[in-house]
Each structure stands twice: as structure tokens, then as C-alpha cells.
Image (cartoon, rainbow, N blue to C red):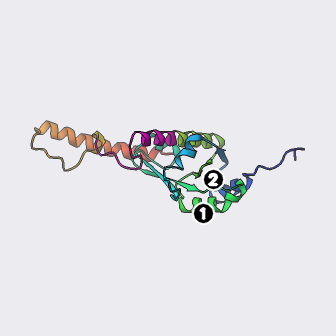
């Protein structure tokens, strides 16, 4: 034991993560402004998670692809961090696919299988939260599928105006999109 040093107030929270995520070897806690702001989209402050979809950086947080829905749990802040342990444990159990928890008006806890992965997770989450804050300011719903765009080619596309060559192109694009999605999901961290 190092003289003059004391355990962090976060120590009980790290143990909660390690107990419920045995592969985790590092937990990072930050007071990111974007993480804090992301907890305030629900002005009533009752939401227990933040939902994000159709952003490329979803691949950076593990177990998610571009068109998946990431659910990041949100727990309420307390006067001291050690008092967050019960809520953190419930959130980790309720949202097993996520490797981070937001603390309302406070910040984020993110973890990974190494300190390098935890750092990457933390940076990816922060990028997503910044994107959400900016999208919200533009009036874009970050929790909804895009309504338009080449990604959303329907299998029942009207072909009256197309000749055979263009129809084939549509089929090839749909096929390539399906292959890309499979590859993205296979390569997710």
C-alpha cells in the first residue's frame, strides 16, 4: 500500500463491472460534457436508456453494427459515487449488450477487455454522444431509421420505369448491401 493514497470513490463500481462482465479488465470513468448532455434529452429525466441507430461509429462500441439499435443505460446521479453501485448493477443486468453506463448529469463508465479497448470504447461512445447532441440541434432523430437514402432499397421496388439492366443493378445493390451487413456484424468488436 502506498502511503498517503486512498481507494477511489469509484472502487465499488469497478467491482460491480468486474463481477458482471468477467472479461472486463479495465473500467474508465469520465465527466465528458457530451455524455452528460446525452443524459438530458429526456427533459423529464425519467428515461433509463439512450437509443442510437444508423451511425457508423456504432461499430466502435462492440457488439453493434451500423443499423443496430444501441441502448446505453442511464442511471441517476447520487451525492457520492459509491452510492451508484446498486443502480449500476441493475443497468448492467438489464442491458447486457452494452459496455457502458451513463450517469445523469455526471458522465460515463465504460469498460473493455483491456485498457486499450476500454479507451477505444470510451472515445467511440463520446463520438456517438457528440453526434446525438448535434443531430438533436439539427432536428434529426438519432434513435430512428433514416427515412430516405440508397441504403433503404426495397425488395418490392416498382420496376415499370426500368429496363432489364437497371433491374439487375437494383438486385445487385440489395445483394451487396446484405453481404456488407453480414460482414459488418461479423467484424463487430
Q: Between 60 and 53, which is closer to the camera in this rendering?
A: 53
User: In the rendered image, is residue 108 in sight?
Assistant: no
Q: Is residue 144 left or right of residue 173?
A: right
Q: Residue furthest front?
A: 44
Whole-percent x, y for residue 32 in the image: 60, 41
Of labels 2 and 1, the one closer to you? 1
How many marks can you see? Answer: 2
Whole-angstrom CA distance, mark 2 to mark 1, is 18 Å
User: 10 Å neighbourhood of mark 1: few (<14), some, or many (≥20)?
Assistant: few
Q: Does 113 appear in magenta?
A: no
The image quadrant that residue 159 belongs to is top left
- The mark found on residue 176 in the picture is none
Q: What secondary structure is found at the residue carrying circle 2?
A: loop
Query: Quick check: 44 above or below 137?
Result: below
- Helix, strand or loop at label 1? It is helix
Residue 180 can be seen in this image: yes
Where is residue 48 drawn, in percent x and y?
Answer: 52, 58
Residue drawn 69% across the image and 55% down it: 13
Numbered range of the magenta stretch? 127-148
Instruction: Decide if residue 179 is on the left or right side of residue 84.
Output: left
Circle number at residue 23: 2
Give the quadrant of residue 74. Answer: bottom right
Q: Which residue is mark 1?
A: 90
User: Sequence order check: which comes first, mark 2 or mark 1?
Assistant: 2
Expressed as whole percent of the image width and height from the top left, the position of residue 112 reads 61, 47
Please tell me which residue lies in front, 63 or 89: 89
Residue 113 falls left or right of residue 176 = right
Q: Left or right: where does residue 177 sit relative to residue 74? A: left
Amino acid at each position: 500500500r502506498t502511503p498517503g493514497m486512498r481507494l477511489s470513490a469509484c472502487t465499488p463500481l469497478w467491482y460491480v463491472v468486474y463481477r458482471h462482465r468477467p472479461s472486463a479488465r479495465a473500467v474508465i470513468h469520465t465527466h465528458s460534457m457530451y455524455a452528460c448532455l446525452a443524459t438530458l434529452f429526456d427533459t423529464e429525466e425519467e428515461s433509463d436508456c439512450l437509443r442510437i441507430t444508423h451511425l457508423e461509429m456504432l461499430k466502435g462500441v462492440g457488439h453493434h453494427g451500423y443499423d443496430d439499435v444501441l441502448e446505453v443505460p442511464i442511471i441517476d446521479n447520487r451525492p457520492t459515487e459509491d452510492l451508484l453501485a446498486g443502480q449500476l448493477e441493475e443497468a448492467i443486468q438489464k442491458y447486457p449488450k452494452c459496455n457502458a453506463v451513463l450517469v445523469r448529469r455526471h458522465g460515463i463508465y465504460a469498460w473493455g477487455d483491456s485498457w486499450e479497448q476500454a479507451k477505444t470504447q470510451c472515445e467511440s461512445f463520446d463520438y456517438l454522444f457528440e453526434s446525438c447532441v448535434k443531430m438533436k440541434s439539427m432536428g434529426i432523430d438519432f434513435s430512428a431509421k433514416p427515412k430516405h437514402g440508397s441504403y433503404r432499397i426495397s425488395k418490392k421496388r416498382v420496376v415499370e420505369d426500368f429496363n432489364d439492366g437497371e433491374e439487375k443493378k437494383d438486385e445487385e445493390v440489395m445483394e451487396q448491401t446484405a453481404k456488407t451487413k453480414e460482414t459488418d456484424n461479423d467484424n463487430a468488436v
